[in-house]
Image (spheres, rainbow, N blue to C red):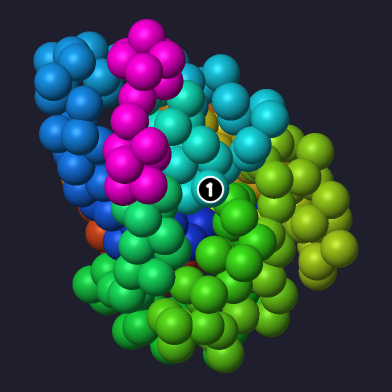
């Protein structure tokens, strides 16, 4: 493994700013909307199943989540969901798309530290308009030399993105809270993967850590990244 990192890719949602908490709050509201038809656990299980089923059709993000809520409401009510409930679901989805962006602790200081010495790329998946909105509202845009909003994060996607950078995938690092999307496919592409756990994580993003891989690292918070890079450059 190369010990010289020249490019650092950053995930956005729940790595740079809060995201999953908004989904959790909306899901809690959604369970309440259907409380006359099913218990909260059943509603949650059916919603997760719908999300998983619909990823290939709607992709990641708020719009796909909203459609999955509508589909779940139809299923749970046996096709008798009131129009008022559909309206309420759609309003909840729109509220998610206008929710204020709140950056996570240490993000600005970390990017300030790294920007002079590394090429920084934002690599995020989800709805194009929503991700562009969140980046603009976050105030982080000027830190990045490139922004990639992709439909999914796969080894091929990382190979393509990092293949255009100085040193290619071998000299690139991907940093994020999702083991499944940020770490594992980046390592498979030949890059270094750094996991930054978040207290909330979507069930469909869970995966086992690649214990034993010399390309895998974990830090507790993002502000530990400069020290990790310093260690890698001295080994």
Q: Where is residue 224 in the image (x, y as percent from the top left)?
A: 30, 64
Residue at the spot x=53%, y=48% of the render?
63
Rendering quarter of residue 129: bottom right
Q: Mark 1 highlights which residue?
A: 63
Left or right: where 62 falls relative to 9: left
Q: Tell which of 177 and 3 is nearer to you.
A: 177
Magenta-drawn stretch, dominant element (helix, strand or loop): helix
Magenta extent: 74-89
Image height check: is 49 above or below 22? above
Q: Does the magenta stretch include residue 15?
A: no
Q: Where is residue 126 in the image (x, y as percent from the top left)?
A: 59, 51
Residue at the spot x=35%, y=62% of the render?
95
Left or right: where 213 falls relative to 209: right
Q: Where is residue 38 in the image (x, y as percent from the top left)?
A: 18, 14
Image height check: is 223 above or below 73? below
Mark 1 element type: helix
């Amino acid at each position: 493994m190369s010990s010289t990192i020249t490019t650092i890719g950053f995930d956005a949602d729940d790595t740079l700013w809060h995201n999953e908490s908004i989904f959790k709050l909306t899901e809690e509201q959604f369970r309440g909307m259907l409380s006359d038809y099913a218990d909260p656990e059943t509603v949650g299980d059916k919603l997760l199943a719908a999300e998983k089923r619909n990823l290939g059709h709607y992709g990641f993000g708020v719009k796909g989540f909203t459609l999955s809520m509508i589909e779940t409401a139809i299923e749970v009510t046996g096709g008798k969901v009131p129009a008022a409930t559909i309206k309420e679901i759609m309003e909840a989805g729109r509220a998610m798309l206008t929710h204020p962006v709140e950056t996570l602790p240490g993000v600005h200081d970390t990017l300030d530290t790294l920007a002079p010495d590394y090429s920084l790329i934002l690599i995020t998946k989800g709805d194009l308009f929503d991700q562009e909105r969140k980046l603009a509202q976050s105030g982080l845009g000027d830190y990045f030399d490139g922004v990639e909003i992709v439909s999914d994060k796969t080894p091929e996607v990382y190979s393509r993105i990092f293949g255009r950078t100085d040193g290619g995938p071998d000299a690139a690092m991907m940093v994020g809270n999702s083991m499944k999307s940020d770490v594992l496919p980046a390592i498979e592409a030949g890059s270094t993967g750094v996991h930054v756990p978040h207290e909330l994580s979507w069930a469909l993003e869970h995966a086992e850590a690649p214990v034993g891989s010399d390309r895998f690292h974990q830090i507790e918070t993002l502000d530990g990244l400069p020290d990790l890079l310093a260690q890698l450059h001295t080994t």
